[in-house]
């Protein structure tokens, strides 16, 4: 049983801080054994009445505390596990504290820690309080000046936020640098880096003609891997000027790559710190997908400079204010850099396989949560991805122009402030002159709404009717939901030709063919469309205009028509996915009943037509030919059966491969090019399609195909094609598997990010002995428990391997739990995140439910459970 009580923080309890922090001067003396931090705060009470000064603080040794240079005695202040309180303070004063830290022992990777010989920080959400006592809330803004003192040889580069204002040599081989950030900021945006790093540099001229120095700091060995990241930064900066009118504000923008990092990256003002996997890339070591991900994350952190830094959050409940908006902005950036349709498909797929399960599980919470125990647990798909969908809906409802005016108004009104989601919505409502009251339910009600749509056609009047009902399932603490205000974008197609028809609502003038926005705001609404000679086929939820589940009784031939003719890429893709999904789920039923499986001939033919079509967007074609994932299919089953899903899906893959073997070979051949690989050569779609064909073919496990795969591996000049060959090979029980895995390891052992791929590939194998294989890999000398990337590459990846993680004997669950039990004392934040797959136990059969719960209980029974882990385990075992 847990021995500690953990406090729940409620949104309704928000109170502004009693003091203003006019400035903070920090001095870090970095040492191998001990690091000293001196902080001088200029404080001013906001009110007339004397109140105690309460500072957040933990995990450091408090050496001294002084007010206006007078040292306080131990009776003058109180220290608890979480705070430092001085009961009596003047109305205006200087507070100086000295703390002692041991960054070299900080495995939580929060606050000040060491990674690969370098000192670095991670302060969001509440890491700053482990550096020095401080009002560590996002609405306390102050001007930071930071001096760093360190050994010159070991740490030649000393960085912090803002501009370098002083630097020089000190006795004993030390040196110092002083940085000043003119923009008042909350402590979560503070950053410090000290290390032996090389710098890559580019110049950028902003739209108003200011010169900015873009700087990337890396280890010497990685010098050649930073070009794409730096280039992506310049692209993101230009794009934000052109699309959102946002200009950068400091003279330099620095990015540092760290090997040990809890998440993707961090938007510290002027000094981003990145997980090295989102910075380092060469064509030989990174895939097309990696290059895209780098561009996206670089963009995301840059866009935060306005949506997050210039305008920040009043409290952490408002997190989606910066994260949802910034994800929306990075999605739009990537859409403009790549293929818009394919980007939308990928974002929807991600939402459905990550956020929908969250919304349907024990941790379900609204985009703006009402309470939390540990804020780090709320950096969720709901806050990020669903938050971005909410912004997207606003854009649809207001229209491009008003939406942009609303954003401009928001940035103008609130520049330099810490605000709330209401402030954001108010700016949008004011700019669009719209009542968005009902819309704000998207921020307060959890759960994925369902649209149930039925239709009817009256030939005598040429009227087509859509009846739309909306509902939303109960979620923890929210049994009943009110209707949402949401945009349903739709069109009507001619059933004979697939042509777009005019969408004329009863009583309106015909607007001409095209999309139509229907605004939903009631539990049930009826829309009547007139002037239709024949019954049309509705194309619903174009562009995935709202984050909902759609239930409309499409027939198979409707879906075939939509998949072939619909002009909206999302709807076209969705029709094919739905068709394939229904077929696989039917087969899964047959599999469960022990019946022989047989694949529908019409489906094979439709698939062949798509495969051999002349669709010029090869990336889109690859999406259309990719079957729904096992994870998504599990979402569609009332009781998820991972074995049946895997069996049925693999049967479809193999049948398609054997029946369309020649077509797969031909399409693959057509997509392969003799020219050497180049980043952004416009051929990523072709590579994706070629590798998809290879993956289908490899399901047949025939020797000539294995040879083909082997040849691709040895002949490839880029990581995309190497991984394209290795991925299907690791699920194939053949001697080539071992051979190539070991060649790959030997070739890449010096590159951490590539070795992470090597672990992941094996953790994702379909082979029946994968659990044992992962156990062996845990003993591999390259496995590192305390490095989040490495732990995720093996253990978290394995927990995404649906069929092996959910092994009916519970061995997969046990493996994850055993490793989490080792990780919890080292890194509670990452541990809590990686628990997610166990929390979905209610979705499975009673045997698996029991096994999964038993593992959660095993964790629950640990002594001194950190609050991150406590919260997830406790909520997921609760009876509601
Ligand atoms: N804002 C950071 C995430 C911080 C997570 C803290 N547990 C990165 C981002 O979303 O841009
Ligand atoms: Zn972010």
Image: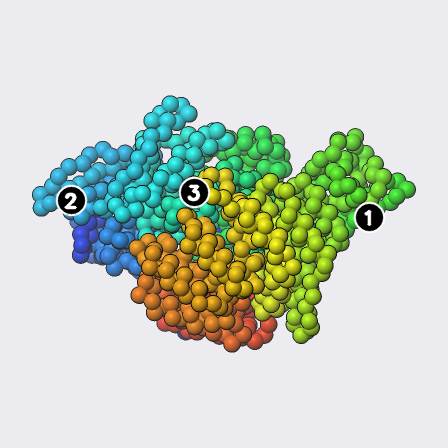
Q: Earlier in the sequence, mark 1 or mark 2?
A: 2
> Relative to 675, does residue 380 appear above or below in the rendering?
below
Return the residue at label 1: 456
Q: Residue furthest left?
A: 171
The foreground one among 138 and 842 is 842
Within 10 Å of the Cα at label 1, are there few (<14), some (14-19), or many (20+) other Cα atoms? few
Q: Position of residue 188 (x, y in %)?
A: 36, 46
The foreground one among 692 and 54 is 692
The residue at label 3 has a CB less than 8 Å from ligand 1: no
Residue occupying the point 62% across, 65% down: 651
Return the residue at label 3: 676
Contact between marks 3 and 1 (CB within 8 A): the answer is: no
In this image, 548 relative to 146: left or right? right
> Relative to 844, does residue 669 appear above or below in the rendering?
above
Residue occupying the point 60% across, 46% down: 621
Mark 1 secondary-structure assignment: strand
Residue occupying the point 44% across, 60% down: 761
Mark 2 secondary-structure assignment: loop
Return the residue at label 2: 152
């Amino acid at each position: 049983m847990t021995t500690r009580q953990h406090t729940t923080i409620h949104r309704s309890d928000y109170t502004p801080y009693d003091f203003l922090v006019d400035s903070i001067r920090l001095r870090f003396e970095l040492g191998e054994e001990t690091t000293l931090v001196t902080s001088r705060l200029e404080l001013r009470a906001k009110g007339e009445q004397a109140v105690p000064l309460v500072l957040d603080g933990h995990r450091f040794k408090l050496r001294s505390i002084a007010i206006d240079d007078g040292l306080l005695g131990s009776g003058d202040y109180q220290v608890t596990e979480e705070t430092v309180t001085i009961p009596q303070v003047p109305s205006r004063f200087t507070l100086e504290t000295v703390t002692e830290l041991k960054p070299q022992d900080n495995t939580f990777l929060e606050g000040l820690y060491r990674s690969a010989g370098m000192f670095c920080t991670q302060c969001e959400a509440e890491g700053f309080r482990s550096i020095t006592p401080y009002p560590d809330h996002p609405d306390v803004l102050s001007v930071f000046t930071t001096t760093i003192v360190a050994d010159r040889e070991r740490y030649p580069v000393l960085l912090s936020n803002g501009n370098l204002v002083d630097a020089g040599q000190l006795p004993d081989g030390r040196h110092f640098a002083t940085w000043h950030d003119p923009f008042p900021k909350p402590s979560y945006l503070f950053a410090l880096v000290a290390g032996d790093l090389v710098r890559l540099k580019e110049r950028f001229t902003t739209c108003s003609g200011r010169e900015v120095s873009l700087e990337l700091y890396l280890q010497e060995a990685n010098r050649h891997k930073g070009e794409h990241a730096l280039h992506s930064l310049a692209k993101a900066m230009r794009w934000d000027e052109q699309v959102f009118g946002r200009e950068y504000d400091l003279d330099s923008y620095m990015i540092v790559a760290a090997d040990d990092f809890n998440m993707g990256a961090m938007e510290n003002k002027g000094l981003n710190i990145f997980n090295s996997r989102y910075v380092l890339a060469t064509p030989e070591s990174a895939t097309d997908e990696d290059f895209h991900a780098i561009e996206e994350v670089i963009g995301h952190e840059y866009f935060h400079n306005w949506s997050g830094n210039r305008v920040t959050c009043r409290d952490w409940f408002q997190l989606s204010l910066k994260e949802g908006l910034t994800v929306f902005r990075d999605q739009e950036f990537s859409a403009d850099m790549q293929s818009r349709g394919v980007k939308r498909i990928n974002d929807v797929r991600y939402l459905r396989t990550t956020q929908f399960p969250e919304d349907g599980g024990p941790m379900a919470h609204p985009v703006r949560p009402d309470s939390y125990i540990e804020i780090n647990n709320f950096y969720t798909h709901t806050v990020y991805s669903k938050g971005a969908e909410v912004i997207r809906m606003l854009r649809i409802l207001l229209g491009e122009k008003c939406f942009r005016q609303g954003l401009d108004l928001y940035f103008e009104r609130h520049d330099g402030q810490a605000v709330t989601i209401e402030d954001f919505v108010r700016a949008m409502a004011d700019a669009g002159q719209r009542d968005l009251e009902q819309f704000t339910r998207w921020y307060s009600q959890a759960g994925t709404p369902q649209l149930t749509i039925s239709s009817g056609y009256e030939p005598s009047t040429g009227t087509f009717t859509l009846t739309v009902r909306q509902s939303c399932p109960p979620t923890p603490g929210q049994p009943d939901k009110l209707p949402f205000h949401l945009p349903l974008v739709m069109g009507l197609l001619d059933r004979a030709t697939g042509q777009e028809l005019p969408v004329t609502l009863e009583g309106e003038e015909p607007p001409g063919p095209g999309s139509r926005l229907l605004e939903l705001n009631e539990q049930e609404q009826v829309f009547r469309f007139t002037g239709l000679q024949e019954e049309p086929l509705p194309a619903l939820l174009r562009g995935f205009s709202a984050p909902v589940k759609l239930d409309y009784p499409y027939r198979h031939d409707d879906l075939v028509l939509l998949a072939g003719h619909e002009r909206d890429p999302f709807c076209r893709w969705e029709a094919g996915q739905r068709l394939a999904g229904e077929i696989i789920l039917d087969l899964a039923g047959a599999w469960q009943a022990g019946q022989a499986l047989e694949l529908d001939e019409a489906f094979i033919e439709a698939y062949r037509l798509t495969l051999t079509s002349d669709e010029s967007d090869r990336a889109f074609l690859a999406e259309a030919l990719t079957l729904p994932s096992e994870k998504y299919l599990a979402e569609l089953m009332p009781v998820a059966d991972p074995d049946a899903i895997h069996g049925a899906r693999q049967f479809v893959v193999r049948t398609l491969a054997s029946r369309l073997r020649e077509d797969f070979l031909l399409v693959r051949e057509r997509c392969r090019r003799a020219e050497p690989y180049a980043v952004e050569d416009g051929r990523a779609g072709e590579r994706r399609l070629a590798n998809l064909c290879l993956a289908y073919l490899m399901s047949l496990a025939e020797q000539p195909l294995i040879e083909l795969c082997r040849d691709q591996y040895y002949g490839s000049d880029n990581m995309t094609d190497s991984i394209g060959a290795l991925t299907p090979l690791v699920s194939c029980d053949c001697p080539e598997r071992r051979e190539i895995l070991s060649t790959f390891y030997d070739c890449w052992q010096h590159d951490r990010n590539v070795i992470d791929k090597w672990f992941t590939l094996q953790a994702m194998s379909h082979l029946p002995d994968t659990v044992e294989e992962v156990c062996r890999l845990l003993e591999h000398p390259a496995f590192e428990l305390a490095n989040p990337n490495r732990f995720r590459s093996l253990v978290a990846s394995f927990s995404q391997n649906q069929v092996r993680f959910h092994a009916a004997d519970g061995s997969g669950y046990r493996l994850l739990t055993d490793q989490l039990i080792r990780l919890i004392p080292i890194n509670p934040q990452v541990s809590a995140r990686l628990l997610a797959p166990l929390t979905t136990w209610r979705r499975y059969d009673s045997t698996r439910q029991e096994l999964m719960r038993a593992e959660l209980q095993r964790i629950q029974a640990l002594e001194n459970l950190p609050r991150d882990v406590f919260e997830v385990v406790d909520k997921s075992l609760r009876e509601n």
